[in-house]
């Protein structure tokens, strides 16, 4: 089985070497059958070309003769839950859904975010509720049409 940390190192090295500071790794999954899924996000979004370039780079660093694998590189989906503070920072001023560790759900506007906490304003609480990341079970952008 391919080592997930090896893929992470390849991705991080590529982003640094290509000066892609606006892009960041969100997640790497490797199944027992060597199906690799890499999800990236970007402060200004992710272009299809970014995924293609990264995929080609990862493949160039792997040896298919040694271990066969399937690779998918994709942008972080809108329906996915955030996994790191940088995703909150990127989405300041967006409508989000937050579920805390006690199961309480808050829908509102992400007013602030840094490396330690978020501030979400809701219809009930215009001043906002400050939540440390440790108290957040899951959160994601809410798409309104």
Image: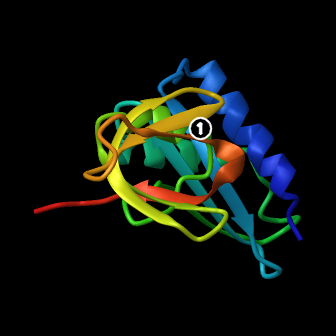
Q: Residue at x 72, y 47 (%)?
A: 134
Would you identify the image quadrant in which residue 140 lies? Answer: bottom left
Relative image position of residue 56 (x, y in whole percent): 56, 47
Relative image position of residue 60 (x, y in whole percent): 68, 46
- Give the secondary structure at mark 1: helix
Q: Residue at x 82, y 57 (%)?
A: 4
Q: Which residue extends farthest left?
A: 145
Q: Which residue extends farthest bottom?
A: 33
Query: As drawn, is 42 to the left or to the right of 33?
Result: left
Q: Is residue 11 visible?
A: yes
Query: As drawn, is 20 to the left or to the right of 110?
Result: right
Relative image position of residue 144 (x, y in whole percent): 17, 61
Q: Residue at x 88, y 64 (%)?
A: 66
Q: Quadrant of the C terminus?
A: bottom left
Number of marks drawn: 1
Q: Nearer the viewer, residue 134 or 55?
A: 134
Q: Give the colouring mode of the picture.
A: rainbow
Would you identify the image quadrant in which residue 19 lies? Answer: top right
Would you identify the image quadrant in which residue 44 lies? Answer: top left
In the image, is residue 82 above or below residue 57? below
Relative image position of residue 125 (x, y in whole percent): 34, 46
Q: Residue at x 60, y 29 (%)?
A: 15
Q: Nearer the viewer, residue 108 or 43?
A: 108
Label 1 neighbour load within 10 Å: few <14, some 14-19, many 20+ = some
In the image, is residue 123 above or below residue 93? below
Q: Quadrant of the N terminus?
A: bottom right
Query: As drawn, is 17 to the left or to the right of 129?
Result: right
Q: Is residue 59 visible?
A: no
Query: As drawn, is 91 to the left or to the right of 4?
Result: left
Instruction: Identify the residue under disc 1.
Output: 85
Q: Nearer the viewer, residue 29 or 139?
A: 139
């Amino acid at each position: 089985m391919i080592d997930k940390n090896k893929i992470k190192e390849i991705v991080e090295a590529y982003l640094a070497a290509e000066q892609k500071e606006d892009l960041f790794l969100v997640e790497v999954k490797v199944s027992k059958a060597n199906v690799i899924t890499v999800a990236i996000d970007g402060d200004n979004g992710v272009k299809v070309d970014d995924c293609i370039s990264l995929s080609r780079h990862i493949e160039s660093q792997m040896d298919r003769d040694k271990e066969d694998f399937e690779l998918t590189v994709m942008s972080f989906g809108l329906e996915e839950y955030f996994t790191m503070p940088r995703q909150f920072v990127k989405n300041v001023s967006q409508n989000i859904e937050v579920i805390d560790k006690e199961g309480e759900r808050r829908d509102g506007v992400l007013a602030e975010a840094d490396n330690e906490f978020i501030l979400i304003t809701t219809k009930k609480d215009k001043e906002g509720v400050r939540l440390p990341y440790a108290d957040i079970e899951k959160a994601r952008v809410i798409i309104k049409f």
